[in-house]
Image (cartoon, helix red, strand yellow):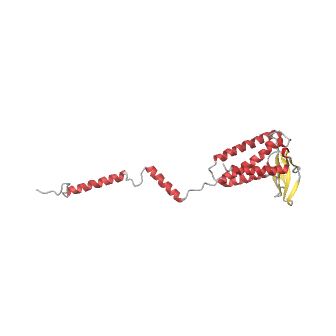
Amino acid sequence: MKILFVSLIIIIIDQISKLFIKGFSIPFLGIAYKGMYIGEKIPVIGNFFRITFIENPGMAFGFNPGINLKLWLSLFSLVASIGLIWYLYKIRNQRFALRFSIAMILGGAIGNSIDRIFYGVFYHYAPMFYGKVVDFLDFDFFHFSLFGKEFYRWPIFNVADASVSIGVILLLIFYRQPQNSPKPDEKEKSSDENMSNNMNIEPNKPTELDKDVLTSKDKRKGENKLQHGDSDHGEVIPD
């Protein structure tokens, strides 16, 4: 399924951006990149858009499910990603827009799942499945409240979060749209074929009704010949 390349590109961009924010090292190549420290802010477009490094231990918008539910959240993300791959295979012949939106959601889901499952082990701060998600995109859109919590800036997110959100929006737009209807010529051709199949009539072949009509006409012609004294042996001579 070529559409999975969309998910792969999103995963690569997401993980590379997170590694440059958090930092990484490759000892056998002698590479060590420090990255940013937690809470550090780098203005990009004034105060409207900043790169702000935080680690999200739980779900979106900073909601923390607690240590007891952390494992289940990581496992759910993994199972959901597998389910999306299966669904993409199931709809492999559907419209591109529908498959593209699912591929975007899948890429974002896998991107954040990598953080939750492996980052704790990679960065030596937690066992597998207990890692934290790296967030850094910080926008000052508007002030709002959600579930009783006040947000004076848009919650900090990452590339994977953006991919999931865009994918969901596209899915809502394209999922209910009907398939392209066949062209008029195709409809007429299909209708003619169905009618021919249902009646089991070959083209240009006389039907049983036509045969009966022809036979009746032949009989009437024969009767007319006899009435006028015609026969197959010539004219009849009166006595």
Left or right: 218 with respect to 159?
Answer: left
Query: Which residue: 72% across, 42% down?
Result: 79
Q: Is residue 180 above or below residue 32?
A: below
Left or right: 232 with respect to 67?
Answer: left
At which x and y percent is residue 237?
13, 57
Quarter of the figure that contains the C terminus: bottom left
Query: Which residue of the protein is positioned furthest toward the bottom in this rendering?
Result: 46
Residue sitting nearer the eye, 176 or 137: 137
Q: Is residue 78 above or below residue 204?
A: above
Query: Which residue: 27% across, 53% down?
Result: 219
At which x and y percent is residue 201?
42, 51
Quarter where residue 69 is shown: top right
Q: Is residue 152 visible?
A: no
Left or right: 23 with respect to 90?
Answer: right
At which x and y percent is residue 106?
72, 48
Q: Is residue 208 visible?
A: yes
Query: Which residue of the protein is positioned furthest toward the left in this rendering?
Result: 239
